[in-house]
Image (tube, rainbow, N blue to C red):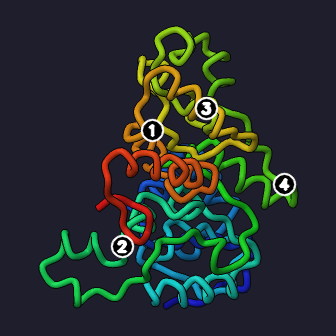
Amino acid sequence: MSSSSSADVRPTLAVWKFASCDGCQLSLLDCESELLALAGAVRIAHFTEMSRATVDGPYDISLVEGSITTPDDAERIKEVRSSSRYLVTIGACAATGGVQALRNFAEPGSYARIVYAHPEYLQTLETSTPISAHVPVDYELHGCPIDRGQLLEVLLAFLAGRRPVIAGHSVCQECKARATVCLLVANATACLGPVTRAGCGALCPSIGRGCFGCFGPSDSANTPSLAARLRSLGTSDDDLVRLLQTFNAAAPAFRDEAIHSTPVRLARSGGQSKSGVEQ
């Protein structure tokens, strides 16, 4: 491991991976021409997606992708936090627990028993949790994956010593900005746009597909109201729960409504586990 050069006074940037798919880390590499300018402004000291070369901490900014799913992860994130001046989580996994958090709704170990021939070899926590459940976080950047423009804004903001300017409004505003007809109103299409954070550019609604919440709940998300509207349009409880339990299943605004809708579904099907989820 190489040591930091005393002549290089650039702020140091480290990128860390926990339980995730690497997609948000790749968003940093996708910055392409902007990445060259960024590399001139900061010293990329640890980023195994890009290079095997590493520099010892402490680090000025750490970007953390992924959720905490193992005992080792729970200890390692503390080490990352202690060596980082600022810690920024990137993506749905780091911010809300990600797709892995679907296991939070099931009996402990039930998914592992289905997927692995020898689940006894695994050492995992019973739940998948966001980084903020374990250490203090300075900023959370949402998305699955994150938007590279938002990532650059966050990095520039921290380098400049200011708060990032990232929209907290819903996807609906992005639909209006690109003159996309509202699928929910015009076609009765199940869509999470009214409760989902902007950042994707309303990509799915622009091609006639309802938003499925990859950027997580918006700042003013009223999920119960949207759920009632979707039911009035014919969305079943099963479909509503499936819509809410994807990339941000453990985000409180989505999780609570999914749990609220689950007993209704179970009452009709006649079965319920101790966790409140049908087996």
**Sooner in the amino-acid sequence: mark 4 or mark 1:** 4
Where does label 4 land, which residue?
163
Residue shown at 39% from the left, 60% from the top:
277
Query: Few, some or many C-alpha atoms within 10 Å of disc 1 (few <14, some 14-19, many ≥20)?
Result: many
**Sooner in the amino-acid sequence: mark 2 or mark 4:** 2
Q: What element carries label 4?
A: loop
**Sooner in the amino-acid sequence: mark 1 or mark 2:** 2
Q: Is mark 2 on a helix, strand or loop?
A: loop
Which amino acid does the dot numbered 4 rest on? Arg
Query: Few, some or many C-alpha atoms within 10 Å of disc 2 (few <14, some 14-19, many ≥20)?
Result: some
Residue 50 visible to an observer of this rendering: no
**Sooner in the amino-acid sequence: mark 3 or mark 1:** 3
Residue 24 visible to an observer of this rendering: yes
Q: In which quarter of the image is residue 169?
A: top right
Which amino acid does the dot numbered 2 rest on? Glu
Q: Is mark 3 on a helix, strand or loop?
A: helix
Q: Where is residue 130 in the image (x, y as percent from the top left)?
A: 57, 68
From the image, state whether disc 3 or disc 4 is nearer to you. Answer: 3
Where does label 3 land, which residue?
226
Nearer the observer, 211 or 241: 241
Circles 3 and 1: CB atoms closer than 8 Å: no
State whether residue 144 is above or below residue 240: below
Estimate the spatial distance between the alpha carbons at disc 3 and disc 4, rounded to whole Å: 31 Å
Q: Quadrant of residue 99?
A: bottom left
Q: Position of residue 270 (x, y in %)?
A: 32, 53
Circles 3 and 2: CB atoms closer than 8 Å: no
State whether residue 89 is above or below residue 84: above
Where does label 1 land, which residue?
240
**Sooner in the amino-acid sequence: mark 3 or mark 4:** 4
Dot label at residue 107? 2
Q: In this view, does 146 lie to the left or right of 222?
A: left
Nearer the observer, 216 or 22: 216
